[in-house]
């Protein structure tokens, strides 16, 4: 049977454990199954147990397709994991843990943990810098994620929204290559050193750079073709604008406000990874393509429940 192309086909296809294993093997070990401990390839398959056994005499000789992936140590089978991956990669505005729980017949707590693991696989760890001579330029902009001012009581709004900006929202920086990919992450502040260090980390020197009038960006003209649009006067001046990032912020905030409702600051970077993956792969890729891409990234990543609930993790790019 060919690989599924729709959610209905995926549910039917992955109801068979053998199909789940075959799909995982094709994406994780395209050159043949190998031991995750020692890398040995002449492993034997134990059909009754649906696992492999390495011929070397080391600990954990037997392993399944889930070992060494985001699925490791999960009591759930791949018949639930793979449809969950399909659901989150195909949803335009995300999918809540409550919806996953109802769809798969698991608890909301389990679904919440599943989604965080899948977001970990969506994470982009590319070290290639954006921009360069052949690009259409790079936009840089920042936003704040938190409660909406219009929904706050007057006394709360006066305390939380000051003349210098929101006092308890989370700052997020986005870097978008026009016609290319976006990178987005939580930053500790909008101070000059913080923002400029991130720009230099992710953008090739000499690139045309477009930002708003925030003073933290002053000085970037020494390394970039830095052009500024003052939003107090205009939003577009020819090619000088940050509308691409404004579009992304709109999609991000609709997903957080409409689907997830409330996101804790220490988990925010995972939701940013999810939305960035969805944005970067929105064109010329089907649901099946995005699903396949995430499955090819699950190996070598492990996220435990203690790590997720311990409020420990990377919060920047």
Image: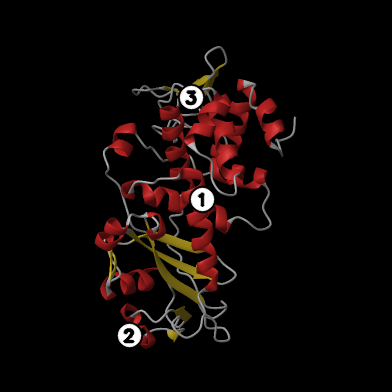
In the displayed structure, would residue 58 be above or below residue 34? above
Quarter placement of the C terminus: bottom left
The residue indicated by pointer 1 is: 255
The residue indicated by pointer 2 is: 219
In the image, is 2 to the left or to the right of 199?
Answer: right
In the displayed structure, would residue 243 be above or below residue 213? above
Under tag 2, what secondary structure?
Answer: loop
Q: In the orientation shown, which residue stands out farthest toward the top? A: 48
Q: Between disc 1 and disc 3, whose residue precedes? A: 3
Question: Residue, x 58% and y 86% (percent of image)?
Answer: 238
The image quadrant that residue 190 belongs to is: bottom left
**Can residue 29 be seen at all in this image of the molecule?**
no
In the image, is 179 to the left or to the right of 6?
Answer: left
Question: Residue, x 62% and y 29% (percent of image)?
Answer: 22
The residue indicated by pointer 3 is: 64
> How many numbered markers are drawn?
3
In the displayed structure, would residue 172 be above or below residue 273? below
* Inter-mark Cα distance, 2 to 3: 53 Å
Q: In the orientation shown, which residue stands out farthest toward the right? A: 1
Number of the front mark, 2 or 3 = 2
Q: CB atoms at circles 2 and 3 under 8 Å apart? A: no
Numbered badge on residue 159: none
In the image, is 70 to the left or to the right of 180?
Answer: left
* Inter-mark Cα distance, 2 to 1: 34 Å
Number of the front mark, 2 or 1 = 1
- Residue 121: image x %, image y %? 47, 44
């Amino acid at each position: 049977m060919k690989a599924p192309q729709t959610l209905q086909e995926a549910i039917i296809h992955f109801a068979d454990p053998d199909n789940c294993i075959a799909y995982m093997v094709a994406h994780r070990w395209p050159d043949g199954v190998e031991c995750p401990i020692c890398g040995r390839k002449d492993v034997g398959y134990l059909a009754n147990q649906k696992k492999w056994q390495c011929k070397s005499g080391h600990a954990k000789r037997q392993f399944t397709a889930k070992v060494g992936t985001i699925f490791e140590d999960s009591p759930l089978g791949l018949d639930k994991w793979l449809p969950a991956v399909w659901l989150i990669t195909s949803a335009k505005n995300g999918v809540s843990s409550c919806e996953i729980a109802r769809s798969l017949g698991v608890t909301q707590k389990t679904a919440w943990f599943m989604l965080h693991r899948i977001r970990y696989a969506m994470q982009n760890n590319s070290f290639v810098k954006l921009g360069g001579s052949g690009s259409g330029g790079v936009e840089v902009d920042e936003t704040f994620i938190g409660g909406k001012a219009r929904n706050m009581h007057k006394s709360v709004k006066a305390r939380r929204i000051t003349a210098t900006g929101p006092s308890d929202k989370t700052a997020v920086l986005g870097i978008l290559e026009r016609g290319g990919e976006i990178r987005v992450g939580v930053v500790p502040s909008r101070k000059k050193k913080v923002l400029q260090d991130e720009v230099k980390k992710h953008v090739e020197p000499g690139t045309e750079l477009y930002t708003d009038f925030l003073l933290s960006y002053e000085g970037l003209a020494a390394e970039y073709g830095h052009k500024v649009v003052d939003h107090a006067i205009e939003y577009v001046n020819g090619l000088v604008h940050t509308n691409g990032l404004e579009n992304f912020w709109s999609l991000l905030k609709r997903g957080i406000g409409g689907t997830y409702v409330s996101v804790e600051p220490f988990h925010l970077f995972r939701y940013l990874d999810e939305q960035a993956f969805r944005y970067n792969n929105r064109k010329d890729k089907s649901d099946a393509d995005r699903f396949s891409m995430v499955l090819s990234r699950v190996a070598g990543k492990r996220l435990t429940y203690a790590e997720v609930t311990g409020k420990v993790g990377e919060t920047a790019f």
